[in-house]
Amino acid sequence: MPLTKTEETFLAQISLEAPWELVETFSVMHRWRPEDVNKGADAIGKRLKALGIPFEMHEPTIFLSVPLDASVKLGGKTFRAKPPSMSTSVPDGLAGQLVYLDADEEMFRSYTRDPKEIFKDGGTDGPTRVGGKIAILNGFANPGTCSLLEEWGAKAVIAVNPGIDIHWGTCTTIWGSPDLDDLPRKPKIPVVAVNNQDGNELIAAAGAGQSATVSTEMLEGWFPQKVPVVTIPGATEPDRFVLVHGHYDSWEVGIGDNATGDATLLELARVLHNNKGQLRRSVRIAWWPGHSTGRYAGSTWFADHFATDLDEACVAQINCDSPGCRWATSYHQTTCMPEARAHVSAIIQEIAGQEPKFKRPNQAGDYSFNNIGISSYFMLSSTMPDPLRAEKNYYAVSGCGGNIAWHTENDTLEIADRDVLMTDMRIYLLSVLRHANAAYLPVDWRAGLAEFLATIDSYQAAAGSAFDLSPSRKATEAICAKLERLYGQMHARTLTEARANEALMRLARVLVPINFTQQARFRHDPAYACPPLPTLASARDLAGAEPVRAGFVKTQLLRGQNRYLGALREASRIIDAALA
């Protein structure tokens, strides 16, 4: 899709001056303790004011867990360690016998909670082996895995990171500040991470049946934090808006994660504000605290406090995390919901000359809006090509463009790359601009429903004759036919833009939750992997299930299919109203 003259005008105004100055400022500013995080917000606010951009500085109180210190003692030796956010604090230490679990290191850094995917033996005897002991395994302090080990009775968890550095992280499955329903999932055991060399020594000690002592010290509680938000009003549809956002708190100075993202948002604010008369819809730009030490507490606060506004008016959310990092010239891990893939693909091809490869959004990265039902794309930005990562012998990480400085003290100024940042800023600007200015919102629900059909077919194959998912398939096929009529009228311009766009946005409120959430709307799902069409996913558990368990699975599936069919009936009513 060639650039329009308006798009060329916007893109020509992108400069590195303001964003790079913020990157350099943040390169000497720690932003993980609460008082330092607020200084980061003030630095953003200062620059917005200097640029003449109006903004609001919200000051919510959110729940944070800030790591202070940790260690592992084995005999007379003390190993350096880092506790992830939300680890239980045991400054006096907790002793126990070490037990090693053979984990798939790549899966341990993912968001799954399924023992068959995490452990090489499927975790079949996990509770027996782990109960009352300190579990040690390779990988990162993943929330899903840590919660599983706690459930199995582990006294503590030691994650052996893949390299010489120790990575910060978080170990809670609670999304954002906890409510009363979340509190039972608050971690009750200490969790630490150690580097690979020390970890291998501890693994050997586990093999010899030795004991160790884990100590952690955390600063935990409710803290006032600042949330800068810019609203750039559209000239034609000011009541509809695109939300683009990223976190400004970081571990240490966090340049690739996420000072470069903060700088990108600042430049978007500058260019869009200077050209606001050419925007059809509004654009809202937000910087979050509480990403690292609050498990997305800042964006969750916003989703909670502005839920009605988001429900009624937000046409898309775009996450900005880790753009502009050195060597990150590939777009083969582009996060995007299926309905937005054509839109995003055209932009990356136009700006970067690449056809992106897409991935399903993880239950991560300030995607705090799924339960409201908002079409979404991007999370992590560009990344280094796989051959280059292999050449450097880098293991996989979740940010910094693939640089293993991610979540360490080494995520400093040299991780940022001016040329890559310029490319990524152009991608983000064009994405926001096209979503704000499109006559018809650039989402294609036919792609989403095609994915639904493939998912249903895979679940039916897994269930075999034990459960009939044909009602779900027939209902999905019926929606597909109605969508063809809807998009046909849009293509022919016989359907008004207002009526079409209302339908496209309302479809998101129904179809995003049914594909990405298990909790009710306006709540927040746990921070571990959610399978496609989760209400039908238990079909995978029927094969080989003994009769008593099979009965429970079928009951789950019946209720899940009812929820799915109810969602599609609502989607059908939305389309019918648009076509009437």
Image (cartoon, grey):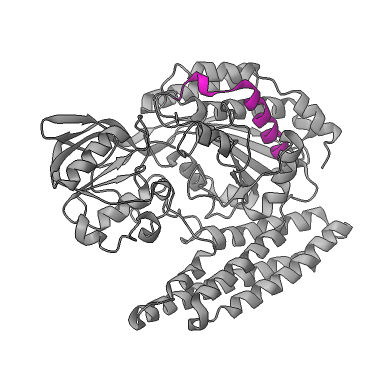
Is residue 414 a member of the stretch shown in magenta? yes
Q: Residue at x 40, y 23 (%)?
A: 36
Q: Is residue 225 above or below residue 457?
A: above
Q: Position of residue 281 (x, y in %)?
A: 73, 41
Which of the 4 image quadrants contains residue 118?
bottom left
Q: Residue at x 52, y 55 (%)?
A: 371
Q: Position of residue 47 (x, y in %)?
A: 58, 19
Magenta span dominant secondary structure: helix
Left or right? Give the position of 370 relative to 438. Answer: left
Q: Which residues are magenta?
A: 411-432
Q: Residue at x 11, y 34 (%)?
A: 75
Left or right? Give the position of 293 relative to 419. Answer: left
Left or right? Give the position of 97 relative to 24. Answer: left
The N terminus lies in which quarter of the figure? top right
Q: Residue at x 55, y 54 (%)?
A: 372
Q: Position of residue 512 (x, y in %)?
A: 59, 58
Q: How many numbered badges does the structure rendering display?
A: 0
Name the outermost residue toward the left: 76
Is residue 578 among the parts visible in the rendering? yes
Is residue 320 among the parts visible in the rendering? no
The C terminus lies in which quarter of the figure? bottom right
